[in-house]
Image (spheres, rainbow, N blue to C red):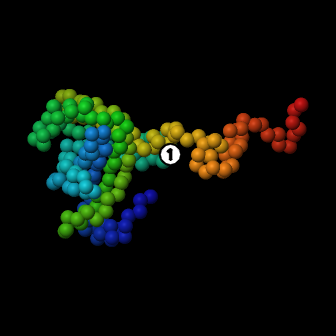
Amino acid sequence: MRSLPPQVLVQMDAGTLAMRGLMRFDLGSGTYGFWTGSEPLTYGGQTYLPGGVVQVDAIPGELGMDAQPLRITLAESPDDGLTPAVLATIEQEDYHQRPVTISDVFIDPDSRAIVHVEPVYRGYVDSIEHTDGPEAGLVAMISSRALDNAREGYRMRSSADQQLVLDGDKGFEHAEVAGKQEIYWGREKPK
């Protein structure tokens, strides 16, 4: 459940709040930002370009441990400078498994000030494919951060590893054999 600040809720109830979408790509060579407004926006030290040519599928809202895919399409738009040559430069980017964040931006329509930014989807770029034809562009497949649930870390649940954290801690003293021992509850141990 999302919890929005009280000032946002009051303005939403009054119908005096504008909402836009914000996308941030943290690629190997730098950070790129797009938003659904008509003018460039600077937020958090990053300039977000108008992304009228960016289309995002419906953001999945399922529970569970599995990574949820999302498709983002960037259409070719020579008027906006997105020529086929510019779109082809994505191949030089280090984009695989790089973070993507999609947020809702709440804007006061009178002052044009950002009232609140709420992240709604975080994920990693899985693949980017080129599409040709009358609707040429790029299609990026994004996997949600639930992907991290299946990744193994470098730490082990062992007594030796726990000693690196806190010398003398015996919390994992029996961890290495606990799952391998058979316990005979209410019966005699075989001879």
Q: Quadrant of residue 158?
A: top right
Position of 123 relative to 180 (above/below): below
Q: Position of residue 81 (x, y in %)?
A: 12, 40
Quarter of the image that includes the C terminus: top right
Q: Residue at x 68, y 42 (%)?
A: 175
Packing grade of label 1 (10 A; few <14, some 14-19, many >=20) is few
Secondary structure of the residue carrying numbered label 1: loop
In the rendered image, the residue lying farthest to the top is: 132
Position of 85 with respect to 114 (left or right) is left
Q: Position of residue 188 (x, y in %)?
A: 89, 38
| Along the line of sight, the residue nearer the viewer: 94 or 13 | 94
Position of 151 relative to 46 (above/below): above
Q: Total marks drawn?
A: 1
Q: Is residue 36 visible?
A: no
Quarter of the image that includes the N terminus: bottom left
Q: Is residue 180 visible?
A: yes
Q: Residue at x 82, y 40 (%)?
A: 184
Position of 54 relative to 117 (above/below): above
Position of 188 with respect to 97 (left or right) is right
Q: Residue at x 45, y 40 (%)?
A: 147
Looking at numbered disc 1 in the image, what kind of residue is underneath it? Gly
Position of 119 with respect to 163 (left or right) is left
In the rendered image, the residue lying farthest to the front is: 167
Q: Position of residue 123 (x, y in %)?
A: 38, 44
Position of 48 with respect to 170 (left or right) is left
The residue wearing badge 1 is: 64
